[in-house]
Amino acid sequence: MRVALDVMGGDYAPREILSGARKALKENSDLFLLLVGPEEVLEKFPSHERVEKVPAPEWVEMEEAPAEALRKKPRASIRVALELIKEGQAQAVVSAGNSGATFGAALLTLGRLPGVLRPAIATVLPTLGRPAVLIDAGANVDCKPVHLFQFALMGALFSERILGIKRPRVGLLSIGEEGGKGNFLVKRAHALLSESPLNFVGNVEGRHIYSGEAEVIVCDGFVGNICLKVSEGVAEALGEMLKREVRRDPLALLGFSLARRALSRFRHKVDWREYGGAPLLGVNGVVIIGHGRSDARAIKNALFTASRFVKTGLVEKLRLSLSAERPDDLQVVS
Amino acid sequence: MRVALDVMGGDYAPREILSGARKALKENSDLFLLLVGPEEVLEKFPSHERVEKVPAPEWVEMEEAPAEALRKKPRASIRVALELIKEGQAQAVVSAGNSGATFGAALLTLGRLPGVLRPAIATVLPTLGRPAVLIDAGANVDCKPVHLFQFALMGALFSERILGIKRPRVGLLSIGEEGGKGNFLVKRAHALLSESPLNFVGNVEGRHIYSGEAEVIVCDGFVGNICLKVSEGVAEALGEMLKREVRRDPLALLGFSLARRALSRFRHKVDWREYGGAPLLGVNGVVIIGHGRSDARAIKNALFTASRFVKTGLVEKLRLSLSAERPDDLQVVS
């Protein structure tokens, strides 16, 4: 299993990225890593029989405009990493860097699977029921109804073939449960999905993402990314507010120390670092987008996610299913 | 202080609404309520010297299409309630009913303040810093840049004049902090806001709503409503997941019983029921939109919010400020 890792991607790159690589190598002896980044950074990583260092003199900063950065930096680490897939040297790429640049570089280097109009990021979320796939989590900010239709298709395939959920329920994220509710985009997407062979359960509201009412949640990348960030923000703020209350109250402090183990199991369950990155579905290769704030643990889990996706044949399954299930007139309904 | 209450609005109407009215009358002796609903419902409410019963034979169901419902039901409780403002019999209206219908009926009955293109719902959120106003929380699903510009203006006035926050920081909800990030709508709104006299701090990400990085969060009503619902969903799911972990562990159960008081203070602080409804800004009158799931406590707090808004002269302040601060070419920049 050969995975290329962009060591310059992420808020805490390269330190946490390299540390995550070390952890992953230790815990998984099947993993062969291609570390991609500037030579002076790679030098610091100790030699390892399952590591190859691939020099890339440039990198895209987190806050750079993706298109411009890719144009100006043809030898950026993310591009070099993706080319390793194309050349057959790597089976997957992991990057926690500028996700717009990863998306753009993947399109340029790997291209789309046949029939796919817009590749999209699929993020797996813990819920009170089964895990839910939110798609698109941020790749496409301005979408047409047909794009949402394809996100639903890819998300359902992912849920069924990779997460093993039979006939996953597909919900369209909106602001009311009736088909007539939502903005212009969502209303038209609702009409398309209603006529699809998917197990479409109609609109779902934001409140229902985490209650487990659908296994696939479809939205445009602007809304999807905001949902994810709001979720993180709420969890962090609630945690902080709770801490403040507990600190003021000696009895509560004692109580929380007794509940230590349960609290740690809980944190583990809801921590995005455990979920290890989100695949970019619809490109011709396994590309895992890590959270920008990834630490070593998140990177390790993203590398494991990548290797699991390669093993399950994610891309081949998507390629076959999309060509089989895609309505012939997909281009027309946009 | 005369407030009209739509007793048929809300998932738990009329029972919880009437029970909220009773609580509010008991706790606030300045409050005079006009209860609006079908006679057979109002009959059950005991006579009270500070209550007038106003019969309305029809009502809009929570799931009805607003425009059609208003056309078919000219004597719906929400319309009758709003007419009481127009006739000078009430100073404010509270409804936890179909918010689309409340919005539509307010436009029809009260009209907009001069210069306002689209009235919007302003929801006050607890944060780690000062309270933040999220606007629009769901009234306008498809917006133009100039609408977002006006939401910012109204939200800032509300924050400054009603919440007492000096030069509130105004943030535009987007998926990256740089001005170039976001969808088409947000990018154009960013340009408009950058040239405004507001204390515009640029884009804010979903994660920063609750960390208190801005006192006014501007977005379209589709995104805003999803943010609110996702926030509720995350809080509920986290609470439930935590409960499940604690229940499995006797020591944690004991610990949590010791922390009971701190937990209850915490819940109180983050409970939307305490925040008592959101004003519809930009219409010619005080209209408070309650949460659809309002119970008696939420209704009581919404009535108190309404009376506070009347006392602080919300509508007059908005009218004056909008006419003073509105750029002359507002219609042009759309």
Image (cartoon, coloured by chain):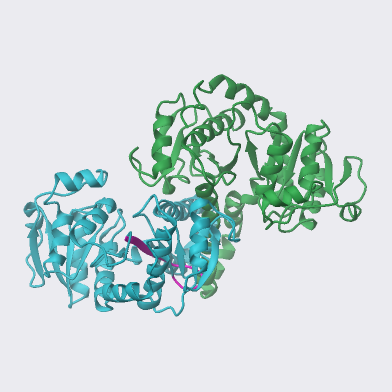
Chain colours: A green, B cyan
Which residue sits at x=28%, y=73%? B309
Which residue sits at x=65%, y=32%? A112
- Residue B267: x and y, percent? 42, 64
Which residue is nearer to you in this view: A219 or B232? A219
Which residue sits at x=58%, y=47%? A138
- Count the marks: how many? 0
Q: Is residue B76 visible?
A: yes
Q: Which quarter of the figure is the N terminus of chain A placed in?
A: top right
Q: Is residue A252 visible?
A: no
Which residue is nearer to you in this view: B182 or B6? B182
- Residue B144: x and y, percent? 42, 54
Asked if residue B145 is positioned above or below residue A55 in the image, the reply reads below
Which residue is nearer to you in this view: A188 or B272? A188
Q: Is residue B204 left or right of residue B34?
A: right
Q: Is residue A134 left or right of residue B12?
A: right
- Residue B163: x and y, percent? 38, 76
Q: Is residue A30 left or right of residue A282?
A: right
Q: Is residue B110 left or right of residue B45?
A: right
Let me know if residue B98 is in the magenta part: no
In the image, the segment drawn in magenta is B119-131
Residue A275 lies in what quarter of the image?
A: top right
Asked if residue A312 is positioned above or below residue A274 in the image, the reply reads above
- Residue A124: x and y, percent? 58, 42
Which residue sits at x=47%, y=45%? A209
